């Protein structure tokens, strides 16, 4: 009976997750289509960046030994995000200098805040900027400076991998990858998601004959590897804070960090990879 209830709950969560995912995919893909003219994509991920930063610092502040200035850090992350957009679109390094000054001000302010563990506060403050604001900032360079099919592929293949891993994991998952960190993540789900992602990469290769097939296979493989580690890293953060989800804004998914956790590591790696293959 308990097994039947768990399966029913899993299916209910799957459909809720699927409907939310379809709606979100539609919004993101539409925003990419209109990005060149209206910068809708930039605006949407500017909001995602703000919400993800809020969730991250909310999680870190749960600890009695950590007390970070959430609002100020969200402002810093927003400056970095839109600064990267401006730099990618128009140039002008002054925006990055402004962000650097904000971080210097953060370090100086910690001298006067008189909190119990200032080094913890500084570490978690910078960590949030590094794993949330920096990746989303780099996303602007991919959106503006690369061919649009890379941006479409980035999101479609991430969602393909996530959905495939979830479905195969729920259906066949027996062998856990990191039970200490993410008890539900299984090798069966990982392999199923990986197969679908590589198939998706080959489909993109078919429709972009000007791009060598191996470049798409490597692209998909990077998403598989670093998407997994991004997911596990966020799970470790939540488990440290004894939380199941980072938030509740997305039914079936949790918070923005839950939805975009894999992007935190994927975006920097993909950005570097696309810069590399331009040279060969």
Image (tube, rainbow, N blue to C red):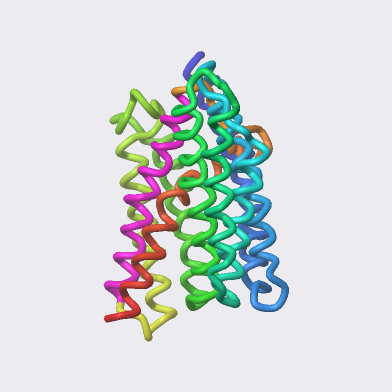
Residue for point 50% across, 76% down: 145
Magenta stretch bounds: 213-239
Placement of the C terminus among the 4 image quadrants = bottom left
Visible residue check, residue 12: no
Q: Residue furthest right?
A: 38
Residue 57: horizontal and vertical position, in percent?
58, 33
Q: Main secondary structure of the magenta part?
A: helix
On screen, 269 above or below 255?
below
Residue for point 29% across, 65% down: 218
Visible residue check, residue 193: yes
User: Is 62 within the magenta?
Assistant: no
Residue for point 66% across, 66% down: 31
Residue 8: horizontal and vertical position, in percent?
56, 27
Q: Is residue 212 left or right of residue 20?
A: left
Q: In terms of image quadrants, where is residue 195?
A: bottom left
Out of 16 and 31, give the one closest to the viewer: 31
User: Is 231 within the magenta?
Assistant: yes
Residue for point 37% across, 85% down: 210
Residue 94: horizontal and vertical position, in percent?
57, 67
Residue 253: horizontal and vertical position, in percent?
59, 38
Out of 250 and 197, give the one closest to the viewer: 250
Q: In terms of image quadrants, where is residue 235?
A: top left
Q: Is residue 120 left or right of residue 174?
A: right
Q: In terms of image quadrants, where is residue 183?
A: top left
């Amino acid at each position: 009976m308990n097994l039947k209830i768990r399966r029913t709950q899993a299916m209910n969560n799957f459909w809720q997750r699927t409907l939310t995912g379809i709606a979100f995919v539609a919004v993101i893909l539409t925003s990419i289509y209109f990005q060149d003219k209206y910068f809708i994509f930039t605006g949407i991920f500017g909001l995602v960046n703000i919400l993800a930063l809020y969730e991250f610092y909310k999680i870190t502040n749960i600890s009695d030994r950590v007390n970070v200035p959430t609002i100020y850090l969200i402002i810093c992350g927003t400056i970095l995000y839109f600064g990267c957009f401006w730099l990618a679109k128009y140039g002008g390094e002054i925006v990055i200098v402004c962000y650097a000054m904000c971080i210097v001000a953060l370090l100086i302010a910690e001298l006067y805040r008189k909190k119990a563990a200032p080094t913890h506060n500084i570490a978690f403050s910078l960590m949030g900027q590094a794993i949330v604001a920096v990746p989303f900032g780099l996303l602007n360079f991919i959106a503006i400076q690369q061919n649009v099919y890379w941006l479409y592929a980035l999101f479609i293949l991430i969602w393909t991998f996530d959905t495939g891993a979830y479905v195969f994991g729920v259906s066949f998952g027996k062998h856990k990858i990191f039970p200490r960190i993410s008890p539900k993540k299984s090798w069966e789900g990982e392999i199923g998601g990986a197969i679908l992602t590589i198939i998706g990469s080959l489909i993109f290769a078919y429709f972009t004959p000007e791009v060598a097939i191996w470049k798409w296979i490597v692209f998909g493989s990077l998403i598989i590897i670093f998407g997994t580690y991004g997911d596990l890293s966020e799970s470790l953060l939540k488990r440290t804070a004894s939380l199941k989800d980072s938030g509740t804004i997305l039914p079936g998914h949790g918070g923005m960090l839950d939805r975009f956790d894999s992007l935190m590591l994927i975006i920097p790696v993909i950005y570097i990879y696309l810069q590399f293959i331009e040279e060969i």
